[in-house]
Amino acid sequence: MTELPDIKYDDRGLAPAIVQDAGTGEVLMLAWVNAEALKRTLESGTTWFWSRSRQEFWNKGATSGNLQHVVEVRYDCDADTLLYRVEPDGPACHTGETSCFHRRVEPL
């Protein structure tokens, strides 16, 4: 059995997970995990999340083929946010963009 780190989940049992390309350092997306999604990620080696809108688990890329292969999982100093460093098979965003953070606020 995979030993889970002592993550501080919010009152819904969720914590944010930032997904970063391990090769480029680009931030690909942010999603939510609970203890079971984290466990599935650690055991499978691909990213699993909890969909707040659908109220179900989802394995990123299982439908599209754009899996995210986990290289490393880190968590922050407060133990309330996770960082998944991944090798992606394709774009992270459902729009086809490499990153979900492809829009810019102007002007800056």
Image: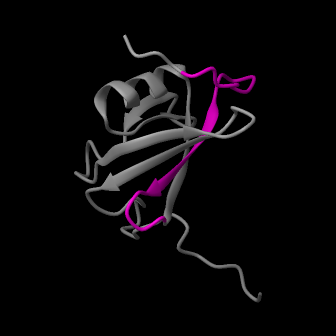
Looking at the rendered structure, the number of numbered marks drawn on it comes to 0
Decide whether the magenta segment is chiefly helix, strand or loop.
Answer: loop
Does 91 sit left or right of 18 as displayed? left
Quadrant occupied by the C terminus? bottom right
Q: Which one is nearer the viewer's eye here, 37 or 71?
A: 71
- Image point (36%, 68%), residue name: 96
The percent position of residue 29, horizontal first and vertical second, equals 51, 56
Q: Give the range drawn in magenta.
A: 5-25
User: Quarter-wise, where is residue 33 in the image?
Assistant: top right
- Image point (39%, 39%), residue name: 47
Does 66 sit left or right of 47 as displayed? left
User: Quarter-wise, where is residue 32 in the image?
Assistant: top right
Magenta span includes 45: no
Q: In this view, does 49 lie above or below 27?
A: above
The percent position of residue 104, horizontal first and vertical second, equals 64, 79
User: Quarter-wise, where is residue 103 in the image?
Assistant: bottom right
Residue farthest toward the top in the current orientation of the protein: 1
The percent position of residue 1, horizontal first and vertical second, equals 37, 10
- Image point (52%, 28%), residue name: 55
Q: Is residue 19 above or below residue 101?
A: above
Magenta span includes 9: yes
The percent position of residue 77, horizontal first and vertical second, equals 72, 38
